[in-house]
Structure formats: structure tokens, C-alpha cells
Image (cartoon, rainbow, N blue to C red):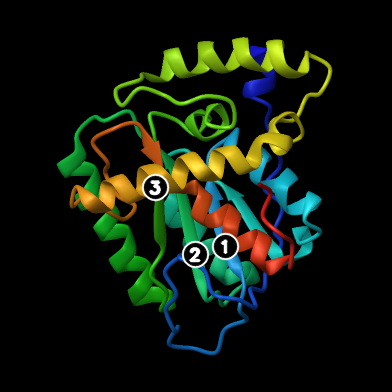
Amino acid sequence: MTADLHRAGGGAIRTIRERDGASLERVSPRHPARDHFLVIAPEPALSYLRDLAISLEIDRKVTLVSADTWDAVLSACLEGHKRAGPFQRMHVVWEWEGEDAASLAMRWRDIVEQVWLQVGVRPRLIVCRPSFLIWILWHFEDVESDCQANEVRKRLERVLKRSVGVHVPALHARTVVHLGEAIRRARQKSRLRQVGGAGGAGWMMETNTDLHELVIAWYRLARRELPE
């Protein structure tokens, strides 16, 4: 089971076009750009997003690149732009367990500035605290505000084995029938952060993620109804 949660995938270059608005940041680049996504993420988030794009039949419209360090994020933004851009949107999915928020926020601002200066696009940050697997667990159950990464993993392993067995390897295939529940939980928590004055993706001080924004944008791109 644990091996499934760490399943590695390739970093193939693909492109994306979005025809409808979403809650994700959109900026006009300095140079003419195709209207598509560059998404940079660590594993297993990258594998999940790849499978989601395939299921929505937009996989040829998505650029997915793996990155596990801040230096790799910056390189992926610049190299992705060089190989498949220019892009109109860039998104970075980042796992964070709550350490050194001020330093990491400063590092992120530096990445945004460098990417903006070099390619004319401001990347959008989507933090997963404490890990990407919090999004997967939300498909099945709520999570305490201070849940740690190890606990998230243990709970997810239990619920996956109980709910769908051990014969479906991909996280997307295991969870897609419960996607509507994950989106409802994510939207509710986002509203609570807005009320508390901590809205928007960033260095959140509780267990959370705004990954649902990217999922919703892709459903709109594919002209599919969101699951209930």
C-alpha cells in the first residue's frame, strides 16, 4: 500500500488550453502565449494530476513537470517555458509541514520575481499542508486542523484498503467516485479561512490545501460537470 502512495511517474511535456474562467490567478504575459497550463509538483501529486488529466481527456493540453526542491521549481518554470511555452498560467503544488514559514515565503517571492522577469508570468502557489495526501484523504473523511503527515498517510492507507481494496494502483482511480466530497470539504475550509482573514493559497497555519481550484479548472476546461 505504501508503495502505491509513492508511485513515481514521468515528467513528460504536455500543453493545456482553458476556455472558461476559474478561481486560479490569471495574468497576461509580456509576450504572446498559448492559453495553457504548466503545473509543477512532487510525486505522488504529479501522478494523480496526470491520471486526472487523462481521465478528462485533456492530457495533451497539460504540461506536467516534477520538482521536489525550490531550486528545481525555478528551473522547471524556466525550462518548461523554454521547451513548451510561452505559458499564460503556471502553478506550483508544494508540500509543506509547517516549518520556517517566513523563510519559505521569502524564497517563493524570489521565485515569482525571477520567473516574472524572465518569462512574464507570475506562478500561482498551491500549498498542501502537511502533504498532498491530505487532498486524497478528504475524499473519505475530514481531518483535524493539526494533523501531521505520518498520521495522514496512516489514515489514508487504512481507508483505501477498507473502501476499495488493494487491486487498483492509481490514487485517482481509487478516489474519483468520492471527488465531490473532497471538493465540498475544500470549499468549506477555504470559506472558513476567508472569514478568518487567512484566505488564498499561501503558508497556511492549519491542515489544508486549495488543490480543488486546479481540479475545478480542469473540469471546466474539459466541459465536464463536477461530481456531486
How far is disc 2 from disc 1 in space, using C-alphas? 5 Å
Q: State left or right for residue 70 relative to residue 212.
A: left
- Say whether residue 15 is visible: no
Q: Quadrant of residue 58?
A: bottom right
Tell me what residue is drawn at x 19 percent, y 47 percent. Answer: 196
Q: Is residue 32 visible?
A: yes
Of helix, strand and loop, which one carries label 3?
helix
Please tell me the numbered disc located at residue 71. 3
> What element does badge 1 sit on?
strand
Q: Gap between marks 3 and 2, in whole Å?
A: 16 Å
The amino acid type found where label 1 is placed reads Leu
Q: Earlier in the sequence, mark 3 or mark 2?
A: 3
Q: Residue at x 71, y 17 (%)?
A: 163
Residue hosting label 2: 90
Give the residue type at disc 3: Asp
Going by the picture, which residue comes out furthest to the front?
228
Q: What percent of the width, then of the height, locates residue 67?
A: 51, 44
Which residue corresponds to mark 1? 38
Amino acid under label 2?
Met
